[in-house]
Amino acid sequence: QKEVEQDPGPLSVPEGAIVSLNCTYSNSAFQYFMWYRQYSRKGPELLMYTYSSGNKEDGRFTAQVDKSSKYISLFIRDSQPSDSATYLCAMSVDYQLIWGAGTKLIIKP
Amino acid sequence: DTEVTQTPKHLVMGMTNKKSLKCEQHMGHRAMYWYKQKAKKPPELMFVYSYEKLSINESVPSRFSPECPNSSLLNLHLHALQPEDSALYLCASSQGQGVDQPQHFGDGTRLSIL
């Protein structure tokens, strides 16, 4: 069993929909939780970064962490075609990043 | 535009060639990283330079060798690579190597081995 599980998709939704992306993890030692967005032929771009359980909002993006359930989510409101990308969750422990597989998201105009 | 700059963007080389990948950051970060990313996979850590100390992923073959000329530059020297080494090579940097320091990535060098 992988330490971080993430559905690779693809996840296809219509423009304007609310998108929910999720990761589950098994290691209670994970301390910080990140979401990266990666466009084709580009490097990962840090979107959200959080430590504690609860919600963190930045514009159309909300990151949610539930440490008791070992579950993190990224919500995208009013999704746009430009949000089409691969979204990777990552978690830090012992100076390393442990990555999910990445979810490919497609926003249909 | 990212604040971590990688050159070249693309590189095609034969298995007997020697080449170098370059990475530069101007954020004053003290930790820099090399990652390898295959298609539809997450990045895999190869090397970390943090406060002038090198940490190596022991699964990385010796045909890859990192060099850190100063705190803002990181090179990856390539020699006698194999076709399976074709991948996107990503450089990242962070303020320090602590678990609370997010990493910022460049756009990578796409490497093809003939």
Image (cartoon, rainbow, N blue to C red):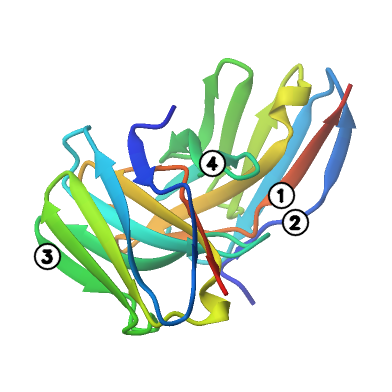
Mark 2 and mark 1 residues within 8 Å of each other at the beta carbon? yes
Mark 4: which amino acid? Tyr
Of B69 and A43, which appears nearest the observer? Answer: B69
Query: SS of the residue at dot 4?
Result: strand
* Chain ID, mark 3: B
* Chain ID, mark 4: A
Q: Is residue A54 left or right of residue A19?
A: left
- The quadrant in which the C terminus of chain A is found is top right
Q: Nearer the viewer, mark 3 or mark 2?
A: 3
Question: Residue B69 appears in which quarter of the rendering?
Answer: bottom left
Q: Residues within 10 Å of mark 4 (few under 14, many from 20)?
A: many
- Asked if residue A95 can be seen in this view, the reply is yes
Query: SS of the residue at dot 3?
Result: strand
Q: Residue at x 78, y 24 (%)?
A: A81
* Chain ID, mark 1: A
Q: Which residue is mark 1?
A: A103
- The quadrant in which the N terminus of chain A is found is bottom right
| N-terminal label among 4 and 1 | 4
Q: CA distance from mark 3 to mark 4?
A: 27 Å
Mark on residue A7? Answer: 2
Query: SS of the residue at dot 2?
Result: loop
Q: Is residue A82 left or right of residue B35?
A: right
Mark on residue B53? Answer: 3
Q: Are marks 1 and 3 on the same chain?
A: no
Q: CA distance from mark 4 to mark 1?
A: 11 Å
Q: Residue at x 41, y 43 (%)?
A: B106
